[in-house]
Image: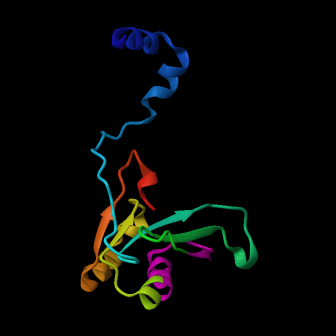
Amino acid sequence: MQQDAKDHVKKCDKCQRHGDMDLAPPHELKSLSSPWPFAWWGMDILGPFTRGLHQNRFLIVAVDYFTKWVEAEPLSDITSFRILRFFKRDVLSRFGIPQAVVTDNGTQFTDKGFQEFLAALGTKQHFTSVEHPQTNG
């Protein structure tokens, strides 16, 4: 059966055209669980959307892994400064220092300033798997 599937994929025009889009090597998925409320946060950016009020095109979202509580803010641009400001004001000041933050590999999250800030708090930063962004909250 496996050989039949391989033969079909080799002959399938659509499979050949779109099959190589996923070039990232597979990684083992790891289960993420939060030990208590507001200990683990998943953060991501949605957009771009059509421009809204105040020229906002993006949405930063933070989701607590335990309670599924959501904090969100519209943004006009997605710089590491804006991400850090959102994190300080909407997560840190309201819920305390988290044990971990899970993000994708976006430049605003891999920025040295953001990573150093989390390290100074003692908060670990975890990155989602390239092939499985659903991991992020």
Q: Residue at x 34, y 68 (%)?
A: 34
Q: Nearer the viewer, residue 37 or 45?
A: 37
**Region of the chain picked out in magenta, as a range:** 71-90
Q: Residue furthest bottom?
A: 93
Q: Position of residue 21 (x, y in %)?
A: 45, 34
Q: Residue at x 72, y 62 (%)?
A: 50
**In the picture, which quadrant includes the C terminus?**
bottom left
Q: Position of residue 47 (x, y in %)?
A: 61, 61
Does 18 appear above or below 124? Answer: above
Q: Residue at x 43, y 86 (%)?
A: 95
Q: Nearer the viewer, residue 99 or 58?
A: 99
Q: Position of residue 123 (x, y in %)?
A: 28, 78
Q: Where on the picture, by quarter, is residue 108? A: bottom left
Residue 49 is inside the magenta segment: no
Q: Residue at x 45, y 11 (%)?
A: 8
Does 113 appear above or below 104? Answer: below
